[in-house]
Amino acid sequence: MMMRGTPSATGLLQVRFWGIRGSTAASGPRFVEFGGHTPCVEIRCGERLFVVDAGTGIAALGHALGKAAPKEIDILLSHLHLDHVGGLPFFKPVVLDKERVIRTYCGHLDGETAKEALDRLFSPPLFPVRLEQLPARLEHQGFKAGETLTFADGASVRTHPLNHPGGATGYRFDHAGRSICYISDIEHSDPWPDPALAAFVHGADLVIYDGMFSEAEYSHCVGWGHSTWEKGVELARAADVKNLAIFHLYPGHDDEYLRATEKELQAVMPSAFLAREGQSVAFAPVDAKTAAASEKSVAAAS
């Protein structure tokens, strides 16, 4: 069952959108309903927190967490383009508690961590302070997209390489028989859907998908590393995905445009929607028998 709003955390697999724009933030009265911050998504597997990407939306997430923020926070980065990391120094848990550990995970640098790139970005003359000067302790983990991440508390997250300039990583969160996939930033291939990607997202309760451009716009943006909502629908249908959230929205598309786009989208896939800042979606656990069957199905498709 998919629930919208702000549900109780216990046992649920949840997502909350804190930043939904791509490339750069958008602001003004025409960008209120969908929001204007760049990518940041909160994933909760029960009470367990994961943060995906550190765009400008991560500042609002940090404010919402407040003193309830865990002492250790894992930030899974799709890649290191500025719209996905620019909010990191403004994440309150980084600046409020010297006992806190913030870990970044980066999968598109052939196993290298994000440390060198982030240290280069967040230092004078580009930025007034270095990350190492902030109170919290930052630790950086590298992996190769396609590997499964395993955490000290026993949690695990599957990953997949994405077609994007310089590379990017997709993530799959499985919990209590439910699953959410984060597939941004990606440019669709020809032919489409890509069989390996379809296997990765197969049977997911929700896929968060890069639908930055319309089909008409995409013809002028080939090679830029982004996709369309139509290609998201094709992937969802091919992979038996139940719900689709179109994400990484073009900063020039205002509320009126996006409402019209969502109407077109839902005409062909009623369970799909365009992501909005502050929006929450939650999936209730399934019973043990159904969960086991679901996990078996996902393993067979991988």
Image (cartoon, rainbow, N blue to C red):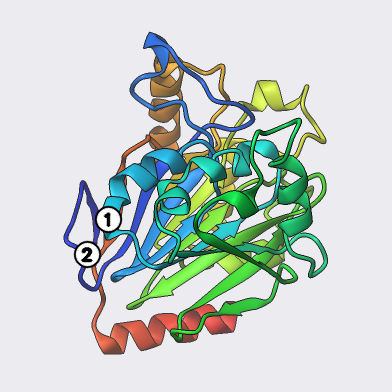
Does the image show residue 269? Answer: no
| Above or below: residue 262 compared with residue 253 | below
| Above or below: residue 93 compared with residue 264 | below
Nearest-to-viewer mark from 2 and 1:
1
For disc 1, the neighbor class at 10 Å (few under 14, some 14 to 19, many from 20) is few
Residue nearest the observer in this picture, 110 or 184 = 110
Residue for point 79% across, 70% down: 111
Q: Position of residue 191 (x, y in %)?
A: 77, 51
Indicate the secondary structure of the residue bearing disc 2. loop
Residue for point 37% across, 10% down: 29
Residue occupied by mark 1: 67
Residue for point 44% across, 22% down: 258
Residue nearest the observer in this picture, 32 or 242 = 32
The amino acid type, in three-letter code, at marker 1 is: Lys
Q: Position of residue 236 (x, y in %)?
A: 52, 54
Quadrant of the snapshot with the N terminus:
bottom left
Q: Quadrant of residue 214?
A: top right
Q: Answer with left or right where residue 209 lies relative to residue 272.
A: right
Residue occupied by mark 2: 9
**Farthest residue, direction top:** 29
| Above or below: residue 125 compared with residue 174 | above
Q: Position of residue 147 (x, y in %)?
A: 68, 76
